[in-house]
Amino acid sequence: MNLTLTSTLLIFLGLFLVGGVISFVKRGLKLAALVVAVLAVLALASGVLRL
């Protein structure tokens, strides 16, 4: 596996967005948490597929 800068940044972005999901859930903002969760899954999936 070749870890490129792009895949590293996408995985980092996905993990950052997972933190945002946790924060939104704690605040009770379910719709915002759902939107950010979808973005987090997309970022993590594209980062992993670029490996």
Image (tube, rainbow, N blue to C red):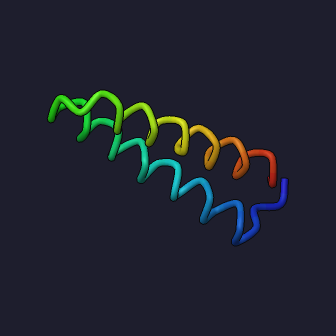
Q: Position of residue 19 (x, y in %)?
A: 34, 45
Residue extending furthest toward the bottom: 5
Residue at 75% over, 62% down: 3
Q: Count of labels shown?
A: 0
Q: Position of residue 8 (x, y in %)?
A: 64, 62
Q: 2 or 9, which is in the foreground? A: 9
Q: 49 or 35, which is in the foreground? A: 35
Q: 42 or 6, which is in the foreground? A: 42
Q: Position of residue 27 (x, y in %)?
A: 15, 35
Residue at 44% over, 42% down: 36
Relative placement, left or right, of 23 versus 38 is: left
Residue at 34% over, 38% down: 32
Residue extending furthest toward the right: 1
Relative placement, left or right, of 4 versus 20 is: right
Residue at 83% over, 60% down: 2
Q: Position of residue 31 (x, y in %)?
A: 35, 31
Q: 33 or 43, which is in the foreground? A: 33
Relative placement, left or right, of 51 versus 10 is: right
Seen in the picture, residue 35 relative to 10 is either above or below; the reply is above
Residue extending furthest toward the left: 27
Quadrant in which residue 4 is drawn: bottom right
